[in-house]
Image (cartoon, helix red, strand yellow):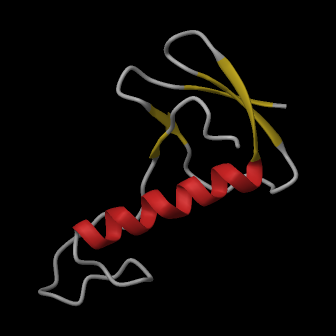
Amino acid sequence: MINLQQDSEGYIRMKRHFPASATVTVTFSDGSQEDVSGRRLNELYDDALALYRAQNQLDAKGFSRGPQKKVQTTIEFVPVQPGMGQ
């Protein structure tokens, strides 16, 4: 079983996808816990990554088509909230 802790800003640390069949327990900052499927967390990760790329003018693969400079192409923190497992 995988356990994740929500930080005070409402995010969990997630650098990669989890197996879709895995059950992940998320402990929220208010002390409540919720079991979430790996598939659902992967969807949240993909949504957060797409939002990050859109806000930073990156294409679907995470590349900047503008002037060349070092650009962070991945995310590490995913926003979560109680009730997201449904």
The N terminus: image quadrant: top right
Q: Is residue 50 above or below residue 25?
A: below
Seen from this angle, which residue lies furthest left?
67
Q: Is residue 6 above or below residue 44?
A: above
Q: Position of residue 37 (x, y in %)?
A: 78, 45
Q: Is residue 42 found left or right of 71 in the rendered image? A: right
Res. 85 image quadrant: top right
Q: Is residue 36 found left or right of 71 in the rendered image? A: right
Q: Nearer the viewer, residue 20 or 40?
A: 40
The C terminus: image quadrant: top right
Numbered label tally:
0
Q: Position of residue 31 (x, y in %)?
A: 58, 9
Res. 16 image quadrant: bottom right
Q: Position of residue 36 (x, y in %)?
A: 74, 39
Q: Nearer the viewer, residue 68 or 41?
A: 41
Q: Is residue 25 found left or right of 4 in the rendered image? A: right
Seen from this angle, which residue lies furthest bottom?
65
Q: Is residue 35 above or below residue 32?
A: below
Task: Name which residue lies at 63% across and 14% down.
Answer: 32
Task: Name which residue lies at 88% across and 52% down.
Answer: 21
Q: Is residue 64 found left or right of 35 in the rendered image? A: left
Task: Name which residue lies at 35% across and 27% down.
Answer: 9
